[in-house]
Image (cartoon, grey):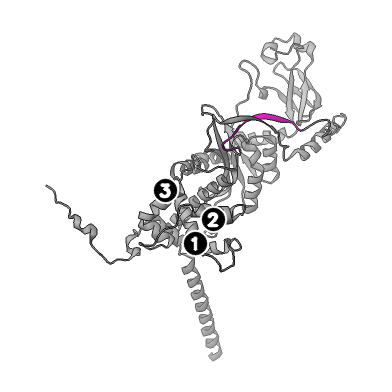
Amino acid sequence: MYEKKDRSQQSQIEFFCLEDLVPKDHILRDIERAIDFRFIYDEVDGLYSDSERGKPGIDPVSLFKIVLIQYLFGIRSMRQTMKEIEVNMAYRWFIGYGLTEKVPHFSTFGKNYTRRFQGSDVFERIFMRILYEAVNCGFIDASSVFIDGTHIKARANKKKSAKVFVPIPAKQYQDELNAEIQADRENHGKKRLKDKDDDENPPQGKTITQSTTDPESGLFHKGEHEKCFAYVTNTACDRHNFILGYEVAAGNVNDSRLFDELYERVVSYFPETETVAVDAGYKTPWIMKQIIDSGRIPVVPYKRPMTKEGFFKKYEYVYDEYYECMICPGNQALGYSTTNREGYQEYKSDAKQCKVCPHLEQCTQSKAHQKQVQRHVWESYLELADEYRHMPIYRDIYKLRSQTIERVFADAKEKHAMRYTQLRGLQKVKMQVTLTFACMNLKKLATWKKRRGILPPVFQRFFEKLRFCSENWITEIEKCTLRFA
């Protein structure tokens, strides 16, 4: 049995308010209560012309709310976002448009980006304003920071590419490393290394595969992943999955190269950070030195030694600090030889002893029967990080990566369409990453404020004024009581 639906109601005229059409538990209501979006007017100050001539532009708050809708709900493009806003009452209510009001054209934001926002840091400031609100509410726990990187597939055909020779950029810490190398050589009685003459030694380079569609992307290939052009974003989050900072680069840039700027920015915003949990890709002498010298604890995993099968592992060669040598598994000493330009101390064995050693086949395949072991001048920082790894408190912190930074990447890709990008160029992809992370922080901020019953900023200011007036009123009563007494 069923009841036929009366279709005539589709053309019936009714009187109602747009406010009543938005569900009371809609996420956009929570977001609207969580933060006062009028701060956007201050952020775009100076980006709009003061002239009264011409047609006025769209309201900046409404414009940015349209963009937030796209990244909040993972809509694939601005064209599709405008189609959704046309028929969605909650979206119209959020951006401040009535039922019969015509929504902007989908190209509106693209034109505003080209004419006003391109080259500015307005998106970064919006991200920081949302993060600042979370800090003020006490939601951020930056005692432990989790850092990792993930790739975003670029809008580029891997078959449309060309071979290009590019110079290898110098390491950011090269000057500090050179000073350490020269000091180490002097301590061992070695001559100082001569500085390279730029005229005689042109900068080193390599040949890479560059996309002709999006030259700023990079060819990415790791493990079983299919080769593709991509971008990489290195991201830092706290214990509660709030994103604290990020860096975006081409997909062929190693994670360790992006660490310096990201780490420096995060610890400057959150100096209370005590531990930094990173993956094995960041377990380098410079990164460990940087974290430990700043007074923090690196939390790293076990890194499998990259040694040929059937040969002794590097950890089986023991460093003797007193005699300044390496002890091999055959209980022979490898004496110090030199310190190379890469910062590695070279220790070499006695070929006469190695030639008759029963472990020669497990040690080296050198025709001269001589084993060479390298140790970085900052190797002690790696050894200290390994000692921390065995402590239960830090081992438990590293286990939280699956619930923190890896969860951030999973949500960004599955719920906010960050698995790939429809944009081209590093700056536009950085804009996408910025807005995606801003929306993720915004959604968490709104949810937590709702659960904990924190009032919106407008009401907070009202009650602060009311409390101030009440305190003054009580103080005056006390004064009068004392006077009459």
Q: Position of residue 11 (x, y in %)?
A: 23, 59
Q: CA distance from mark 3 to mark 1?
A: 19 Å
Q: Residue furthest left?
A: 1
Q: Secondary structure at mark 2?
A: helix
* Residue 361 located left or right of residue 445: right
Q: Amino acid at mark 3?
A: Gln
Residue at the spot of label 2: 112
> Alpha-carbon neighbours of circle 2 within 10 Å: few (<14), some, or many (≥20)?
some
The disc at residue 310 is none
Whether residue 238 can be seen here:
no
Q: Secondary structure at mark 3?
A: helix
Q: Amino acid at mark 2?
A: Asn
Camera-side residue of 14 and 74: 14
Residue at the spot of label 1: 58
> Residue at 43% across / 50% down in the picture?
81
Q: Position of residue 273 (x, y in %)?
A: 61, 49
Q: Magenta span has 162?
A: no
Among the two numbered marks 2 and 3 on one chain, the one whose residue lies closer to the N terminus: 3
Camera-side residue of 380 and 7: 7
Residue stretch rendered in magenta on the structure: 203-214
Q: For the C terminus, which image quadrant?
A: bottom right
Residue at the spot of label 3: 80
Q: Position of residue 125 (x, y in %)?
A: 58, 56
Up-down relation of residue 186 to residue 112 (above or below):
above
